[in-house]
Image (cartoon, grey):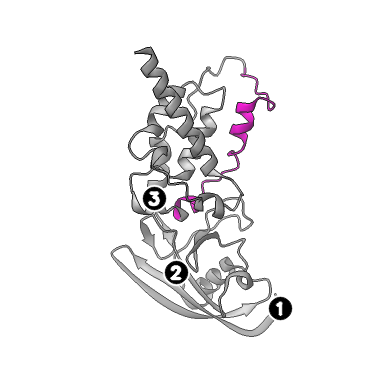
């Protein structure tokens, strides 16, 4: 990197959930510097006890997601010059999740809600059976394909104000995955998915504010998926009433 005479003023959230604090570092500014570069410099050059996550560094794994100046972002893909206000950065762990230490959030509640939403494949065939053909031209398959690029980074979950106000809400990622499986011909539990997403904390808790779609780094639209779940759960409910 080519150095510049500038210095970044970086405030980082430190500590555990039991004792959080803010700590400020002066970090050398470089051309083409990412926020993950800044965090790495602090850990390597200023304080080796700083805890954070990263893996691929190229926007494939999502593990480096953090709050940057109040916005959830992949830090490996976020260039400092695009987000630093007057040479200042504020970095914190993803919101709406418990803090393990420093910039590392506990992702267990996020994935627990995937389970609660039945957002996992329910096999319709065994390992010895022929593969179920998948035709991309089918409308349901096209709808399912819209969400398959989700990499579970948790940014939509951190951006969601409904999650912030309602800890029971399943969240955009889990509901989007449930919608994907609902439209997958290989899934064998359509009724189970609809029951899971229509109950307490389900799709009808969404207020359609759109933060999930606004901040998704992969340009996915969980709000569209949630709207689809709302329609299908209502149709299922009316179908049960007609059959009663």
Over which residues does the magenta segment extend? 131-158
The numbered mark at residue 50 is 2
Residue shown at 53%/43% (left/top)? 222
Q: Position of residue 30 (x, y in %)?
A: 65, 77
Q: Nearer the viewer, mark 1 or mark 3?
A: 3
Q: Position of residue 189 (x, y in %)?
A: 45, 22
Q: Which residue is mark 3?
A: 163
Residue 243 shows in the view? yes
Marks 2 and 3: in contact by CB < 8 Å? no
Nearest to N terminus: mark 3 or mark 2: 2
Mark 2 residue crowding within 10 angstroms, few (<14) / some (14–19) / many (20+)? some
Q: Is residue 190 left or right of residue 5?
A: left
Mark 1 residue crowding within 10 angstroms, few (<14) / some (14–19) / many (20+)? few
Q: Nearer the viewer, mark 3 or mark 2?
A: 3
Q: Which corner quadrant of the image does residue 115 belong to?
A: top left
Nearest to N terminus: mark 1 or mark 2: 1
Residue 120 shows in the view? no
Residue shown at 43%/70% (left/top)? 49
């Amino acid at each position: 990197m080519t150095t510049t005479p500038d210095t970044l003023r970086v405030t980082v959230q430190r500590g555990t959930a039991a004792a959080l604090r803010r700590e400020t570092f002066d970090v050398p500014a470089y051309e083409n510097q990412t926020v993950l570069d800044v965090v790495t410099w602090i850990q390597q050059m200023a304080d080796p006890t700083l805890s954070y996550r990263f893996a691929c560094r190229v926007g494939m794994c999502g593990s480096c997601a953090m709050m940057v100046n109040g916005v959830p972002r992949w830090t490996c893909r976020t260039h400092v010059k695009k987000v630093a206000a007057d040479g200042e950065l504020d970095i914190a762990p993803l919101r709406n999740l418990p803090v393990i230490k420093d910039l590392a959030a506990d992702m267990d509640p996020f994935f627990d809600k995937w389970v609660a939403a039945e957002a996992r494949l329910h096999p319709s065939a065994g390992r010895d059976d022929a593969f179920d053909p998948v035709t991309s031209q089918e409308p349901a398959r096209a709808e399912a394909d819209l969400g398959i690029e989700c990499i579970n980074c948790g940014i939509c979950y951190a951006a969601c104000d409904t999650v912030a106000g309602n800890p029971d809400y399943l969240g955009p990622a889990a509901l989007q995955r449930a919608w994907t499986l609902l439209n997958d011909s290989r899934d064998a539990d359509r009724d189970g998915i609809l029951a899971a997403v229509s109950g307490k904390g389900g799709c009808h808790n969404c207020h359609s504010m759109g933060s999930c779609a606004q901040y998704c780094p992969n340009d996915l639209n969980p709000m569209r998926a949630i709207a689809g779940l709302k329609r299908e759960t209502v149709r299922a409910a009316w179908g049960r009433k007609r059959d009663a």
